[in-house]
Amino acid sequence: MPVVQSHLWMTTQIRAHNRTFLYQRNPNKKPDLPLDCEAEPNLLDLSSAVCRLILENDAAIVAAAAGHTASRDSLMDLIARRAEQISSRAGFFKREIQNCVIDFLFGYGPLQSLIDDPSISDIDGTGPDSFSVTRQGVRQFVPTSFSDEKTYDTFCRLLIIRNGGIINENDSHCRVTDERYRLRINVTVPPRSIPYPAISIRKHPVHSLKLDDLVRLKMMDQNLSWQISRWAQSGRSVMICGKGAAGKTTLLRAWIEAMPELDRVLVAESDSELYPEKKCCLLQRVKRKEEGGRPVCLFDLVRDGLTLSLDAYCVGEIVDEEAMAMIHAAFSGHRCLATIHAEQASDVPDRLMTLARPSASGESDRTLRRMIGAGLDLIILLDRFKIREIIAVRGYLEGDDRYDLETVWFETDHQTTDASAGECTQSLVSGS
């Protein structure tokens, strides 16, 4: 049950209980209870205080209970003990407090309805009463709020801790994945985020959207969908670029589903986002240092994949040194798929080289450009959940020190047109 509903229900029950128990026989006689029970308990405040106390002292138990490595009973006992430390009245409402705290610890409270709404892809908050959502690439405000600043702060920290992350004044930013709801969660807390914590939730659909679904959602028209399907079947390497929440991961997921059924694909991610449904996909995730043992980064996953008899590599998002490993994989003849943040499609080759340069082992800039020109076939630009431009990478012209880029499709005045013929260029696909 969402935390808001349970709190409202609980408050009603407590009020009814107080009226009946304290005054049903003699309005002038008080029951044999502690003096501080004369005041009506505020279970919302008490539950928030218990959550904060558990966060400060018992975060590992919450994470273990969330990961099913510790029993829920041990957490229930802990809640009762912590509640009694805060208020001597807590013992009289033990079960109600336990249920309220459990609901707060493992639910999404005021955000639950947004989590359950399939039309929403992103939820962003900058304060207890400042939230926006993104629907099909369009951001809008929503009238969602928490009861107070402390409850909002506690909620943000809980999302990280119960999913195995660490967040405090020293580690004031953390990104985790909620596998149950398929969410990527970013939280930043003070002193890094001022004056309130900031939260960003990216939702991923339970079932992958296919190209036909993206036509229905107006990311592309039917003709472009057919062309992309042919590119996916023919073994093209592609980089999908755009700003945040543009639809890059959604299109990459659909591209993977359009590839030949028996293609063996390594999907390497920092956090689970793609959730491929193809049977021949190898899904691997990084291992962070706080998880114990030897850390494993995206660079390691891509490099080690060279020995796995792969047809294609897929990196959910290129942000660091994994760019160098991707360039080597593409230059060695493997098909490569990835997303990258860039405002223009023509910026992607230079953006890729900038990320790869710190990890280069002696390669000159000219050599890196030649490798990128040889290994990359297509760059697709998205904005606000629509494909805006597609360019083909024909190679690197060493004499002119520039990439040979050709625009094969772009959108003008909301019409899908090719630069010369008014339709998708077919020559990129052999036999088409």
Image (cartoon, rainbow, N blue to C red):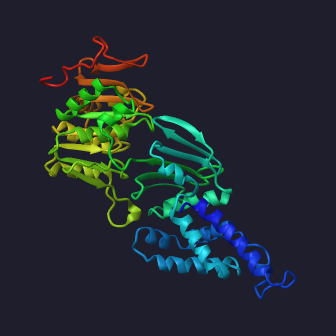
402 or 167, nearer to the observer? 167
350 or 388, nearer to the observer? 388
Vertical side of 66 occupied by 386: above or below = above
Say if residue 275 shows up in the picture: yes
Q: Residue at x 35, y 28 (%)?
A: 220
Vertical side of 17 occupied by 284: above or below = above
Residue 41 percent coordinates (x, y): 73, 72
Residue 366 percent coordinates (x, y): 26, 29
Q: Residue furthest bottom?
A: 32
- Left or right, 299 with reference to 137: left
Instruction: Tell how many labels.
Output: 0
Q: Residue at x 53, y 73 (%)?
A: 58
- Left or right, 251 with reference to 367: right
Residue 191 percent coordinates (x, y): 61, 54
Q: Quadrant of the C terminus?
A: top left
Q: Quadrant of residue 294?
A: bottom left
381 or 367, nearer to the observer? 381
Q: Residue at x 21, y 32 (%)?
A: 236
- Left or right, 110 with reference to 30: left
Residue 307 percent coordinates (x, y): 15, 51
Q: Quadrant of residue 146?
A: bottom right
Vertical side of 16 occupied by 393: above or below = above
Say if residue 169 shows up in the picture: no
